[in-house]
Image (spheres, grey):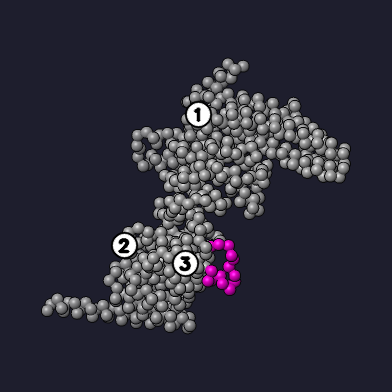
């Protein structure tokens, strides 16, 4: 029989060697054989860009079908494992057990055919040493699926045992001896069955397969093994959420392949996420109904986290963005659950915090890193926003964020004119992706209040950051206002409005309009800015960087608000101040933005077009007189 088995495998491998990649539906790579072949070819001689694009298209074309087939394959082996347990020759009718578990007398004996499943896992495990990685992967995936089915059944037994124990205590307390005896028999039966199933998984899969294949030469098989262990920590945390198994996640953080590093980080992250989702009241997916989330003790991860913390932190700078994202989510969970409370290494905190402002980080990493920063800022402590103080609270939070960013960009011997205030754009973009904090960059009154209050910049530890940081903080707040306005206008106005001051020959006419109309949000923004801009232009007239940011804002105002009688004085002050800035400035960026704003204020059908053109004419006349004077002095 063993020889026949070997012959069949040999024939299968030989057939696979000659089969086209697009006809192989199951292989080691979850994305399919086409993707796997392209990945292998990419390590060879360089090929043209066109061929690379064709390969990518081919991968996507077959990835969906390969993923669906892989899912069916896993479900087949899972169901086979379940059926073998519950309907094998040694099994009793478990459905009757489920129906009777709440009856007054529940002393029946529970039997599951653990031996049959044990034999099935053993037979497919015999293929694990095969040299062809796709065959190895198929065999290991089958063993994993059956092992997960066994653990789900064992989890149900443990839950039934917990119920029986409670009933037993109640029966003993009520001196119901017959019921207590029957329940004792049931508890013993459930316990024996659960131990039998545990032994099948630990002996046949973990010790017999996992400990050898988590170091397999194929990266996808290594990742598959680590992912299976991650699932087991949720299925039976009382067995697998221990240092004995958690250490594998820490070890594989150093793997050379990013698929494995992601799987290892997920192994540490998933218990935290499962507990968080349960606390938030999120419903479990049908496939997760047997997970024992209530038995997860997060404190059991303390040792492995302490030992591998430096590696987790370094993973947020991994070459692969996918690894960075999981590492950042893991660190955020560690912070929220108090695992970093005793960390006194400033380098660890600085490394993580800086990702919120890093242009090399993905938007997802920057957002989660900003969440990480918020956890350290007193302004974001839970205290609620009262209806009467919501604006003040948000202004304090904006000031705290700007202070943090100012302290970060001014650390070191950086000249004040070289400070990268454009990192404020990352903060705004991240805040817009945070449902609970999005209002910070759409509450214009709060943003303007934060700018006007002009408090000293402080660090995350509420220590004054210095004069340079004060200057940077003001610039960052103004830059945040400018970026938030542009982002909001881009979300509520159409493309033609944003490009109204662009040369038609340079505009991209192929871009579709984002929205056909300007909503009330745009009008609210316009009124708030129109009221505040004249004073802000005067206040920061001597700061070229701030003025440059403020000068671009009038372009984002909807023209209809200019016609409001109560806004006439604000409009006249705005266009007058813009004219003065244009005539007094020598900065090219400021001149460009001011000119664009002056031009935009003179367009449209609003009631102030005449006044706008008159003010613009004064600027032109002044420029003409200056040119004439310069030419006259040159002639003399």
Q: Which mark is residue 415?
A: 2
Q: Nearer the viewer, mark 1 or mark 3?
A: 3
30 shown above or below 212: below
Q: Report crowding for label 1: few under 14, some 14 to 19, many 20 or more residues within 10 A (C-alpha).
A: many
User: Which class describes the residues within 10 Å of circle 3: few (<14), some (14-19), or many (20+)?
Assistant: many
- Residue denoted by label 1: 133
- The span from disc 2 to disc 1 (Cα, nearest Å) is 56 Å
Residues in magenta, as a range: 380-393
Dots 2, 1 in contact, CB < 8 A: no
The numbered disc on residue 410 is none
Q: Identify the mark nearer the N-term, 3 or 2.
A: 3
Predominant SS along the magenta part: loop
Identify whether 231 is placed above or below 209: below
Q: Is residue 413 above or below residue 13?
A: below
x and y, in percent, of residue 594 in the image = 34, 72
Q: Is residue 234 visible?
A: yes
First reached walking from the N terminus: tag 1 or tag 3: 1
Q: Mark 3 sits on what residue?
A: 399
Q: Is residue 610 in the magenta section?
A: no
- How many numbered marks, from 0 up? 3
Would you call the spot at circle 2 few (<14 residues within 10 Å), some (14-19), or many (20 or more)? few
Label 1, label 3: how far apart the Cα atoms are: 56 Å
Q: Where in the figure is residue 339, as x and y percent of width and height?
A: 55, 49
Q: For the C terminus, which image quadrant?
A: bottom left
Q: Position of residue 342 (x, y in %)?
A: 52, 51
Task: Say whether marks 3 and 2 touch (CB < 8 Å).
Answer: no
> Which structural element holds mark 1?
helix
Answer with mark 2 or mark 1, whichever residue precedes in sequence: 1
Q: Please give the name of the residue rendered at 49% of the width and 37% of the height, measured from the top-left corner.
A: 252
Left or right relative to 518: residue 419: left
* Coordinates of residue 500 in the picture (x, y in percent): 39, 68
Which element carries disc 2, helix, strand or loop? loop
């Amino acid at each position: 029989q063993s020889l026949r088995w070997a012959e069949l495998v040999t024939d299968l491998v030989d057939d696979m060697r000659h089969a086209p990649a697009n006809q192989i539906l199951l292989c080691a790579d979850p994305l399919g054989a086409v993707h796997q072949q392209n990945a292998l070819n990419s390590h060879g001689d360089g090929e043209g860009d066109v061929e690379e694009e064709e390969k990518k298209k081919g991968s996507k074309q077959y990835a969906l079908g390969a993923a669906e087939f892989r899912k069916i394959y896993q479900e087949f082996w899972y169901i086979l494992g379940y059926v073998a347990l519950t309907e094998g020759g040694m099994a009793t009718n478990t459905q009757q057990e489920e129906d009777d578990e709440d009856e007054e007398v529940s002393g029946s004996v529970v039997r599951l055919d653990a031996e049959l499943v044990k034999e099935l896992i053993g037979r497919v495990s015999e293929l694990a040493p095969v040299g062809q990685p796709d065959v190895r992967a198929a065999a290991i995936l089958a063993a994993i699926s059956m092992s997960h089915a066994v653990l789900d059944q064992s989890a149900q037994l443990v839950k039934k045992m917990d119920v029986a124990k409670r009933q037993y205590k109640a029966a003993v307390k009520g001196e119901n001896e017959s019921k207590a005896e029957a329940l004792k028999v049931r508890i013993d039966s459930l316990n024996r069955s659960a131990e039998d199933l545990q032994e099948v998984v630990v002996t046949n899969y973990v010790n017999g397969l996992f400990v050898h294949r988590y170091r397999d030469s194929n990266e996808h098989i290594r990742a598959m093994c680590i992912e299976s262990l991650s699932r087991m920590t949720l299925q039976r945390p009382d067995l697998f959420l221990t240092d004995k198994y958690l250490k594998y996640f820490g070890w594989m953080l150093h793997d050379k392949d990013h698929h494995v590093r992601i799987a290892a980080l997920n192994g540490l992250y998933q218990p935290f996420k499962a507990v968080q989702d349960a606390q938030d009241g999120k419903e479990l997916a049908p496939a997760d109904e047997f997970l024992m989330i209530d038995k997860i003790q997060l404190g059991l991860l303390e040792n492995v986290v302490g030992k591998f913390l430096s590696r987790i932190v370094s993973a947020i700078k991994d070459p692969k963005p996918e690894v960075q994202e999981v590492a950042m989510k893991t660190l955020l969970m560690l912070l929220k659950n108090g695992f970093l409370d005793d960390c006194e290494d400033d380098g660890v905190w600085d490394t993580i915090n800086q990702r919120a402002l890093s242009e090399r980080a993905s938007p997802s990493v920057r957002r989660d890193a900003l969440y990480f920063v918020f956890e350290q800022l007193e302004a974001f402590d839970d205290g609620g926003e009262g209806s009467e103080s919501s604006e003040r609270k948000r202004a304090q939070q904006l000031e705290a964020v700007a202070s943090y960013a100012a302290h970060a960009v001014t650390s070191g011997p950086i000249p004040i004119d070289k400070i990268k205030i454009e990192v404020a754009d990352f903060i705004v973009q991240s805040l817009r992706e945070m449902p609970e904090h999005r209002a910070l960059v759409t509450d214009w009154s709060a943003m303007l209040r934060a700018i006007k209050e002009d408090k000293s910049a402080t660090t995350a530890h509420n220590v004054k950051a210095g004069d340079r940081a004060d200057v940077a903080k003001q610039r960052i707040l103004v830059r945040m206002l400018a970026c938030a306005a542009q982002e909001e206008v881009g979300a509520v106005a159409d493309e033609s409005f944003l490009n109204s001051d662009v040369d038609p020959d340079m505009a991209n006419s192929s871009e579709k309009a984002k929205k056909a109309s300007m909503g009330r949000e745009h009008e609210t923004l316009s009124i708030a800015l129109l009221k505040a801009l004249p004073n802000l232009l005067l206040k920061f007239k001597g700061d070229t960087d701030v003025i440059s940011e403020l000068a671009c804002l009038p372009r984002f105002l909807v023209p209809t608000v200019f016609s409001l009688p109560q806004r006439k004085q604000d409009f006249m002050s705005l266009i007058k101040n813009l004219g003065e800035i244009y005539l007094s400035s020598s900065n090219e960026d400021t001149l460009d933005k001011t000119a664009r704003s002056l031009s935009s204020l003179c367009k449209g059908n609003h009631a102030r077009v005449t006044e706008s053109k008159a003010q613009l004419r004064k600027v032109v006349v002044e420029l003409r007189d200056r040119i004439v004077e310069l030419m006259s002095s040159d002639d003399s």
